[in-house]
Amino acid sequence: CHAKYGSTSLRGKHCHEMALRIVLSCIETHANRYKRHIVPLLCVHMDFYVRLFVRVYTSANEVKKSASKQSMVYQCTGCGNFHLQPLGKIVEKGNSVKYLPGNGPPVGEHCEECGFKHQLGGAIWNKSMKDDSFVEAVKTQLFENQSEFAGFKRVYGLVTGLSEELREEPLFHDLSVLASHLNAACPPNAVFCSALVNAGYKYSHSHTSPLAIKTDAPMGVLWDIMRGWVKLHPVRTPKEGSPAHVLLKGINKHVPEPDFTVRPEHREHKKNPGAPKYVPAPEKDWGPMQRAPGYATGQEAVSGVHDTRVTKRQRNQGKHCEKDGDVKKRKEGDADGG
């Protein structure tokens, strides 16, 4: 990833969104060399690829803001907490505008939630990945011309999910991962999101995952809510020194008593009028398979079936033994001739 795009990726459920932001950062960096900058219109992850639509402008003055649009990512190896460190900042005083390096790091050596160390990734694009007016225009065009698009349901659901995302919140947390860190049962989506809204924070899901929690709440709020959930649904005592052990020992600072009352808007089952937001895979174990190299397994004479997906191990079996045998024979021939 670093060799191709100049950024380092991090493992996590947010990897697909991070891929989009890495590519945007790469495009922005290359455009800056020619006094140009980009404005993302619509960027999505679909199937096994990313698709980005951006508009390119020429402005040497806007290029100076590029550093503030890109960030490094500090991600905890224990609980998955992440912080963004912008590469630059803009300081305005009256008519004066200065473009300065960013201040950091935003975290200490150890995570403030679980005490584990951080990994460093990036740089990634930290601004919005969409233009709301453009996305709404695409939705309208799709809905009014459904018969012309064979994949209408899937594309319309994808664009709808993107349109509902929070604009200025890079990356996200996964509800199932939060629960797994505490060895707890995963709370229902409506219950957890209601607790967030009742605490005064905004949230949205991501077009890449229905369990994604993209929110303006700090990580401490999420763990306060999860600790409140564990009180109602106790778990086994975790191993001492593990992230779960440290997190469950913590004290709720931001939300002392989480309110899990499901809000009316979450009680109603929201349905997309055009198509579901998250279309299931067309078949079991659907995904990219091993390429067909065109080699036979040697069993087609028996079974009558030509298996082109023979493994590399099968093709190379005994290869080195044959080479060693040929070399040995040549040496013996040379010795006899000598």
Image: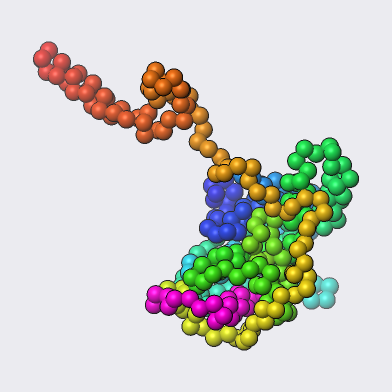
Describe residue 100's horizontal placement relative to residue 308 as left or right: right
| Magenta stretch bounds | 217-240
Q: Position of residue 110 (x, y in %)?
A: 48, 75
The residue depicted at 29 percent of the width and 28 percent of the height is 318
In depth, the one of 179 and 236 nearer the eye is 236
The residue depicted at 48 percent of the width and 76 percent of the height is 235
Tally of marks = 0
Q: Is residue 60 visible?
A: no
Q: Position of residue 145 (x, y in %)?
A: 87, 42
Q: Position of residue 24 (x, y in %)?
A: 68, 52
Q: Position of residue 313 (x, y in %)?
A: 36, 34
Describe residue 124's horizontal placement relative to residue 38 as left or right: left
Does residue 329 sit above or below 120 in this rendering? above
In depth, the one of 116 and 295 nearer the eye is 295
**Type of colouring:** rainbow
Does residue 86 sit above or below 200 in this rendering? above
Describe residue 334's horizontal placement relative to residue 54 as left or right: left
Q: Is residue 175 visible?
A: yes
Does residue 240 sit above or below 64 in this rendering? below
| 311 inside magenta stretch | no
**In the figure, residue 258 lies in which quadrant?**
bottom right
The residue depicted at 50 percent of the width and 64 percent of the height is 119
The residue depicted at 46 percent of the width and 79 percent of the height is 246
